[in-house]
Image (cartoon, rainbow, N blue to C red):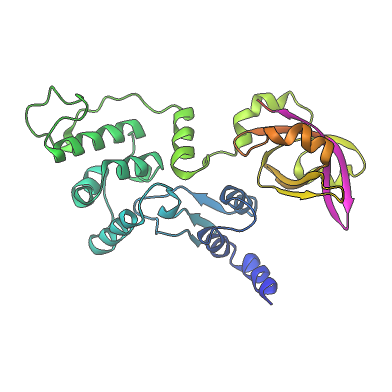
C-alpha cells in the first residue's frame, strides 16, 4: 500500500512528492542524487531564496524550492527568525533591508552562509556575492562598534549599508560552485560531470540511460559515486555494490573481491570516475561488473 501511494504521488504530484522526500532526508541515496532525479523528472530545483524558502523543501507547479534546512551550518533558530520576520512584516527588498530587520538577531557567520548559498541573488540584481559579503562585513563592523580585521580603518563615521561603496571583484564560476559546495554540502547549480565537459568530449563512453542496450559488452562509463554497500563472499572476502550517477541517471556496479582490493580504497563521492567493465543483467536489473577504475580529471 505504501509503495502504491508513493507511486501515485510521484506520478501526479511530483514536485510535492520529491520535496517531501528531500525534506525527510531522502533514503538510500544522497540528497544530491534525489535533486538530480527530480531534474530528470522535468522538475526545476531552485536555490534557497530569502523570500521564498521555508525551513523545509517546498514543491509546487513543477518547481522545488530548496529549504533553509539545506544550509548545513545555518542554525535552525536563525532560519526560524528569518521566516517569522518575513511572515510578520513581508518580503525583504534588499540585503540592506534584511540586515536592518534581522541582522541584529543573527551572527556574521549566518549571513555569510546565506550569501554563499545564493539566498540573496533574487533581490540583489547587479551585485555579486562578493559585493554582498562586503556589505555584510561592514554592517557587522558597525554593529560591533569597531573595525573588522582592519578593513574599515578609513571610516570615521557611520555609513548606511545601502550607500557603502563596494567595489569588490565579481565572482568567478569556480568561486560560486565552491561556495555552494561548502554551505549546501554539494555543487548545486551544475551536475558535477558538467565541470569536465572538455574531457568528456574526448572520451568514448556509454551513458547510464543507454546501458540496457549494451548487455554482454565491455563498456566505459563515467560517474559520481553515490553510496555503497560492502558484503562478504562465502570465503569472507569483501566485495562491494556501488551505484554511480551521470547526468542521465543512476546505474549499479559490482566490485568483486580482487577489483575491490585494487580500487575501492581510492573511491569517494568527492570526484568523478571512469569505470570500465562488462554490462550484465540479473533478474531484469542492469549493472556493470567493474574491472578497472580511473579518474576523470
Query: What residue is at 40 percent from the left and 42 percent from the top?
Result: 118
Task: Kindly indicate the quadrant of the structure image that contains residue 86.
Answer: bottom left
Residue 33 appears at what percent x and percent y? 62, 49
Residue 193 appears at what percent x and percent y? 64, 35
Residue extending furthest bottom?
A: 1
Residue 224 appears at what percent x and percent y? 66, 39
The N terminus appears in which quarter of the rendering? bottom right
Q: Is residue 201 above or below residue 247?
A: above
Q: Nearer the viewer, residue 1 or 63?
A: 1
Task: Judge whether residue 253 can be spotted in this image.
Answer: no
Query: What residue is at 44 percent from the left and 60 percent from the top?
Result: 56
Residue extending furthest right?
A: 216
Q: What stretch of residues is rendered in magenta? A: 277-295
Q: In the visual, does 271 lie left or right of 124? A: right
Answer whether residue 134 is magenta in the image. no
Residue 196 appears at what percent x and percent y? 63, 28
The C terminus appears in which quarter of the rendering? top right
Q: Nearer the viewer, residue 239 or 44?
A: 239
Task: Judge whether residue 14 can be spotted in this image.
Answer: yes
Q: In the visual, does 68 lie left or right of 103? A: right
Q: In the visual, does 250 lie left or right of 283? A: left
Task: Kindly indicate the quadrant of the structure image that contains residue 244.
Answer: top right
Q: Nearer the viewer, residue 268 or 161?
A: 268
Task: Kindly indicate the quadrant of the structure image that contains residue 290.
Answer: top right
Q: Is residue 114 above or below residue 88?
A: above
Residue extending furthest front?
A: 235
Q: Is residue 246 above or below residue 152?
A: below
Query: What residue is at 39 percent from the left and 39 percent from the top?
Result: 116
Q: Main secondary structure of the magenta part?
A: strand
Amino acid at each position: 500500500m505504501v509503495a502504491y501511494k508513493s507511486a501515485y504521488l510521484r506520478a501526479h504530484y511530483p514536485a510535492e512528492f520529491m520535496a517531501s522526500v528531500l525534506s525527510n532526508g531522502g533514503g538510500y541515496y544522497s540528497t544530491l542524487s534525489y535533486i538530480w532525479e527530480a531534474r530528470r523528472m522535468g522538475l526545476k530545483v531552485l536555490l534557497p531564496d530569502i523570500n521564498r524558502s521555508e525551513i523545509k523543501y517546498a514543491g509546487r507547479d513543477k518547481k522545488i524550492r530548496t529549504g533553509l534546512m539545506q544550509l548545513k551550518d545555518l542554525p535552525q533558530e536563525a532560519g526560524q527568525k528569518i521566516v517569522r520576520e518575513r511572515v510578520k512584516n513581508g518580503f525583504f527588498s534588499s540585503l540592506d533591508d534584511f540586515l536592518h530587520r534581522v541582522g541584529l538577531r543573527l551572527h556574521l557567520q549566518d549571513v555569510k552562509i546565506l550569501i554563499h548559498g545564493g539566498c540573496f541573488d533574487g533581490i540583489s540584481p547587479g551585485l555579486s556575492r562578493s559585493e554582498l559579503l562586503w556589505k555584510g562585513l561592514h554592517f557587522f563592523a558597525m554593529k560591533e562598534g569597531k573595525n573588522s580585521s582592519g578593513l574599515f580603518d578609513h571610516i570615521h563615521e557611520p555609513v548606511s549599508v545601502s550607500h557603502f561603496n563596494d567595489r569588490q571583484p565579481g565572482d568567478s564560476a569556480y568561486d560560486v560552485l565552491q561556495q555552494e559546495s561548502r554551505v549546501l554540502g554539494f555543487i548545486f547549480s551544475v551536475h558535477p560531470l558538467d565541470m569536465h565537459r572538455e574531457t568528456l568530449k574526448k572520451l568514448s563512453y556509454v551513458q547510464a540511460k543507454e546501458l540496457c542496450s549494451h548487455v554482454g559488452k565491455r563498456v566505459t562509463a563515467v560517474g559520481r559515486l553515490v553510496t555503497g554497500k560492502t558484503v562478504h563472499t562465502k570465503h569472507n572476502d569483501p566485495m562491494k555494490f556501488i551505484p554511480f550517477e551521470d547526468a542521465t541517471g543512476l546505474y549499479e556496479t559490482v566490485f568483486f573481491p580482487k577489483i575491490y582490493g585494487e580500487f575501492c580504497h581510492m573511491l569517494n563521492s568527492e570526484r568523478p570516475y571512469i569505470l570500465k567493465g562488462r554490462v550484465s543483467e540479473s533478474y531484469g536489473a542492469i549493472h556493470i561488473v567493474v574491472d578497472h577504475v580511473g579518474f576523470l580529471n
